[in-house]
Amino acid sequence: MNEKKKNIVIIDDNGDVLGRMVRAFGNESDVCMKGCTSKRADYDSKLHVDDYLIVINETRIETDLNELVSYLKNRFLYCITPIVVATDTPQEELAGKNMLEAPFVSYIQKIYDNEILHRLVRNLVDTFESQRNLNPLMGFPASKIIFEQVTENVNSGEQFTMMYVDLDNFKEYNEYYGFGNGDLVLVFLGDILFKVVSEMGSDKDFIGHVGGDDFVLFIHDKSVVKAMGQRIISDFDAGIRSFYKEHDLSNNYIEVRNRAGEMERINIMSISIITLDDDVLTSIPGDEIYIMMMAEKKKAKKQKGSVMLDQPIEAR
């Protein structure tokens, strides 16, 4: 099996830091350096949600550093990726240097010694890998950030739709095929959500991982919500069968033992999507919203195959 690369993205308009990083890491097979300029179209095309580290060459970018970091931290694609700022500022002056409003990990010196630079960056990459291994998925924001995003969206007064995405029969698949294969299914779904939101959504949109096989999306253009849901379903249905063995595909089910100890036939996994508009989120207490969402989720799961309940839940 090929080891997945640990991508380090260097935003650097003249290639200064990029060149140093490439020389410091040599031919290490597990690390990949990706260079881009500070032009938004360039780094938006290079950055991805599973990148390990972003390094910005402070003195060699044409855009404002504060604006750049703020933009990166406010986009769901990069909001949890650590950002390091490479600087020419002498070490003794860094303590008094104003910190940015948008958080980043730290400043690092533009070190010419390859061994020191390698050790410094390698430690950052290994630390981030340890954090990522606590959650085997793609690193989407979790509950705390999701809650903050809900509050921010509601307070902004802008229109948006929350999409709740949940897998049907995932628990039984996990038990039958093992948790390792279950993780691969979650990564598969995460890739679909990332691709659909990136291609059909806007810079303001957001993907969060509630936990298990539950995901939340915040979409700001309501006119695309239905099409996005249909695309998620079609992409999922087209690919999910590759995660099953031929015998189970020919049956169109797997057999697992239920709580009563009896063998039960479980259909091939499908996907349920529930939508909730901003007017409901602003008019109903959070605990009631959860109860309503779970009720809608049960309705969706009663229907055969993948389904999207795209009618907004009415406030009681």
Image (tube, rainbow, N blue to C red):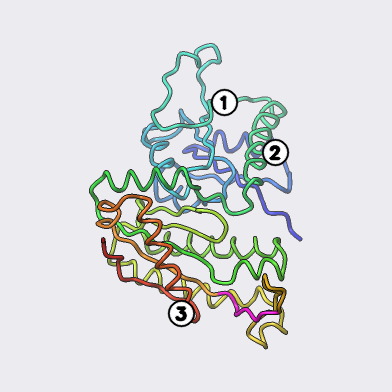
Question: Residue 81: x percent and y percent?
Answer: 53, 42
Q: Earlier in the sequence, mark 1 or mark 3?
A: 1
| SS type, badge 2 | helix
| SS type, badge 1 | strand
* Residue type, numbered disc 2: Phe
Q: CA distance from mark 3 to mark 2?
A: 53 Å
The structure residue drawn at horizontal position 26% and vertical position 45%, both measured from the top left corner, is: 156
| SS type, badge 3 | loop
The structure residue drawn at horizontal position 58% and vertical position 26%, both measured from the top left corner, is: 110
Q: CA distance from mark 2 to mark 1?
A: 16 Å
Span colored in magenta? 263-269
Which mark identifies residue 303?
Answer: 3
Q: Main SS of the magenta segment?
A: strand
For the residue pair 152 and 253, the one nearer the viewer reads as: 253
Q: CA distance from mark 1 to mark 3?
A: 55 Å
The residue tagged 2 is 25
The structure residue drawn at horizontal position 38% and vertical position 31%, both measured from the top left corner, is: 66
Rendering quarter of residue 309? bottom left
The residue tagged 1 is 108
Residue 118 on the magenta segment: no
**Mark 2 or 1, which is nearer the eye?**
1
* Residue type, numbered disc 3: Gln
Labels in figure, total:
3
Residue 266 on the magenta segment: yes
Rendering quarter of residue 129? top right
For the residue pair 210 and 75, the one nearer the viewer reads as: 210
Q: Farthest residue to the right: give it.
A: 1
Question: Residue 191: x percent and y percent?
Answer: 54, 62
- Which quarter of the rendered picture does the C terminus lie within? bottom left
Q: Is residue 274 left or right of residue 239?
A: left
